[in-house]
Amino acid sequence: MNDIIYGKNAVTEALIAGDREINKILISKNIHSDSKINKIKELARENGIVFQFVAKEKFLPYAEFNHQGIIAQISPIKYKDLDDFLEEKHENASVVILDGVEDSHNLGAIIRTCVCAGVSGIIIPSRRNVQVNATVEKTSAGAINHIPIIKVNSLVNAVQKLKNSDWWVVAADASAKDNYYDVNYKDMNFALIMGAEHAGVSKSLLKASDFIVKIPMLKEFNSLNVSNALSAIIFETVRQKLKN
């Protein structure tokens, strides 16, 4: 299992070295805090890395390892900085923002779709969203290596930075009045926000959006899987860009 670092000393050294992308640190509720645990928490805070105290059952998949009640989940890729991304030249470009997508297979499928559609980057939050892991990498069928994944602490702040850089923001919401194909995506840089099936896009992000769109349904049923919904919208933008 090459997507984790386990044990107090190993996790501490990884945090100090800073040469591995750590998605999250899991700390068992059953272990007592000591100087090493406190040091790990301090380093995690300094580096903006999420750590959680979890039940011992979370460690059952790692029973073969001498994990000492602490595991760091490692990303197989290096995340890109949003400011660095915005400094690059973008023309008629698109990015996808994911708000609360929790399933690794969905994220892998989304990455694959975005690469096929020529999306310039994918923005994910550091909390309450699945991070890039081995399952995501495998599900993307290698597409993960062909698109920047941008991790941010605040999606609201990220949206504001995009807008300040003359990007337009489009959010998908089932209760929207406008259909996704009513927006003219040509000749502009735009960000498309997709939310999770159970919660949708947060109110703060909807408020910050320039356009709110829906996918019309012929039957009343649960909303589309987020990766399927993204495909419908993002390839409409491709169709418009390719249309003379």
Image (spheres, rainbow, N blue to C red):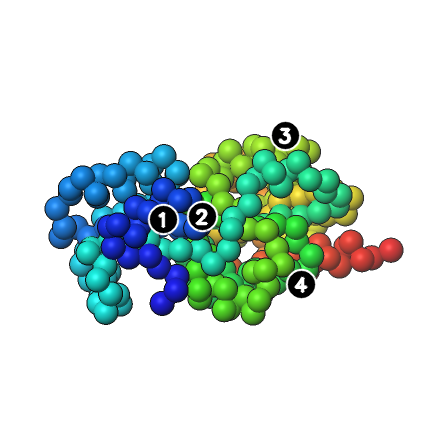
Instruction: Tell me whether the residue at label 1 lies in contact with that at label 4, contact meaning CB atoms closer than 8 angstroms.
Output: no
Say whether residue 106 is left or right of residue 72: right
Callout 4 amino acid: Cys
User: Residue 84: x and y, percent?
Assistant: 61, 38
**Mark earlier in primary sequence (1, 4):** 1
- On the rendered structure, is 171 left or right of 239? left
Residue at numbered disc 3? 164
Q: Amino acid at mark 1?
A: Ala
Disc 2 target residue: 19
Amino acid at dot 2: Asp
Question: Which label sits on residue 149?
Answer: none
Q: Earlier in the sequence, mark 3 or mark 4?
A: 4
Q: Please tell me which of labels 2 and 4 falls first in the chain.
A: 2
Q: Amino acid at mark 3?
A: Asn
For disc 1, the marked residue is 14
C-alpha span from label 2 to label 4: 30 Å
* Nearest to the observer: residue 49 or residue 104: 49
Where is 197 relative to 34, above or below?
A: below
Of mark 3 and mark 1, the one earlier in the sequence is: 1
Q: Which numbered disc flags the more N-terminal residue, 1 or 2? A: 1
Disc 3 from disc 2: Cα separation: 31 Å
Residues at marks 1 and 4, CA–CA distance in whole angstroms: 34 Å
For the residue labelled by badge 3, is the local secondary structure a helix, a strand or a loop? helix
Nearer the observer: mark 2 or 4; the answer is 2
Q: Which residue is mark 4?
A: 116
Choose between 190 and 212: the one closer to the eye: 190
Q: Nearer the viewer, mark 3 or mark 1?
A: 1
Residue contact at pointers 1 and 2, CB within 8 angstroms? yes
